[in-house]
Amino acid sequence: MTIHNAEHSRPRPMTEPPAITRGDRGTDVDDWDRDSELSETTKAVIATIFGLALLIAAFAVIGRLGDWATDYGTILVYLAFFLWMSIAGRVFWWGADKLIAEIRKKSNTAGDRR
């Protein structure tokens, strides 16, 4: 394969092979690299803490919503607050569910619901 440069009219050979795209690899290839990615438990802890921080921030400003609604519009403020709470709650519960599942898996009480 040759690459034509606009400045030079003669073709030059390509020195590097073309990059392999994700679609070119098989579906059974494991992309997880232990040295570069976080574990599922670490991701769950981060998500739980981040979601909890978002919820705390929302509860800290809940008293100012009325003033913001007067200044910027009721629909805009309460829609933004609802979106914030939805995202924060979902992030928190995703992390919490992962942590609870991990704890149950380690203690072998996954099916014991007495």
Image: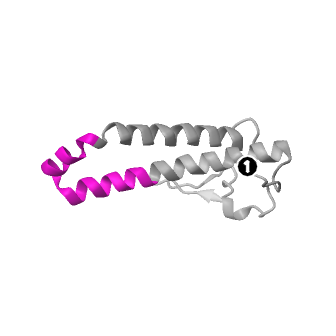
Q: Residues within 10 Å of mark 1 (few under 14, many from 20)?
A: some
User: Where is 60 relative to 91, above or below?
Assistant: above
Q: Report the label total.
A: 1
Asked whether, in this view, residue 66 is left or right of residue 61, the answer is left
Color encoding of the figure: one colour
Seen at 86% across and 47% down, the residue is: 108
Seen at 44% across and 42% down, the residue is: 55
User: Where is 104 relative to 20, above or below?
Assistant: above
Work out whether residue 76 or residue 12 is closer to the camera in this orientation and state it.
76
User: Where is residue 97 shown, x and y percent of the image?
Assistant: 65, 50
Q: Which residues are magenta?
A: 63-86
Seen at 68% across and 44% down, the residue is: 99
Q: What amino acid type is highlighted by mark number 1?
A: Ala
The verdict on residue 93 being magenta is: no
Instruction: Assign the magenta stretch its main secondary structure.
Output: helix
Residue ID for mark 1: 101
| The C terminus: image quadrant | bottom right
User: Where is residue 56 shown, x and y percent of the image?
Assistant: 42, 38
